[in-house]
Image: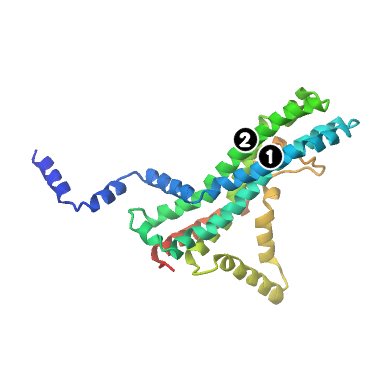
Amino acid sequence: MTAFSDSVSQGAALDPAERPARAVAAQPLSRTFITCVRREIWEHNSVYLAPLIAAGVFLFAYLVGLAHVSHDLKSLDQHPEWRMGAFAMTQEICAPIVIIVGLIVAVAYCLGTLYNERRDRSILFWKSLPVSDATTVLAKAAVPMIVIPVVTFAISVGMQLILLGLSTVILPLSGERIGDWWNFTAIVETPVVVLYGVIVVALWYAPIFAWLMLVSAWARRGPFLWAVLPYLALCLVEKIALGTAFLGGLLRDRLAGVMDVALNLPQQFQGVIGLDELDPAKFFTSTDVWLGLAFAAACLAAAIWLRRYREPI
């Protein structure tokens, strides 16, 4: 009874302004992290709106071009496998478009997420909350590395199903057997291919996202220029001084080499990626992947340190 009364008296002695802070601090770390991620999504609705708009534009263009596509299919009567391939490639274009738009949104988000809160001085408010800098930065990093891939996967698979439904209606009008089309598209394989693609893209570009967040936490103005120009200057110095292009090749491979690492494409590739072309063992055992993730971890650690001591602009 005495211990209970002592705890009550201690709780009553707390400053009322400190009680909400104590309550938030007592929350599990996972709940605080999820709350921070939800705040980022709420503040940056382009994370899901931009891929949705891109998918909507593609769907509109697909509907407008249905008559033209139907005419093209009829002109390929002597090659039925080409007809099926034409429709399959039309559907295969949708997922890469959504993923590319997601990458653009991720780059813009990483460049601005830690810079903008210092520029508008909102960092002073967020630092007054009982949330650590590590939790805040990792929640921000989860947006380009987890949230955007999940959004692009859901939108891509949804668009694939919509296009498949439209094709189910259009193909019989062009004289196709719908059973052949459903067998060819391998509807069960499509989500697996898209899921593998978004995971590979998120892991491969993680060092770029982390570097942009580090620059966003450090730069006082022009974070894009600070993120790009120093590396380009090093590439130029290397080329002039040594006559080599190692840094340029490293950047080129990081930007455009994901297909070579993640896929095993045959010499006569038909343009439609299936399960046979996926090579997860090659990707997850690649030294480039793990070195990139180590670099991303170092950049995020530096971004956490900078956010802790960097003053508002």
Quadrant for the C terminus, please: bottom left
At 40% from the left and 60% from the top, the residue drawn is: 123
Quadrant for the N terminus, please: top left
* Mark 2 lies on residue: 158
Q: Residue furthest right?
A: 78
Answer with left or right where residue 180 lies relative to residue 58: right
Q: Amino acid at mark 1?
A: Leu
Q: Secondary structure at mark 2?
A: helix
- Decide: is 12 above or below 222: above
Give residue 187's quadrant in the image.
Answer: top right
Q: Secondary structure at mark 1?
A: helix
* Mark 1 lies on residue: 59
Q: How far apart in space, not on screen, are marks 1 and 2 (Cα)?
A: 11 Å
* Residue 210 visible in this rendered orientation of the protein: no
Image position, residue 99 (x, y; %): 63, 46
Answer with left or right where residue 220 lies relative to residue 12: right
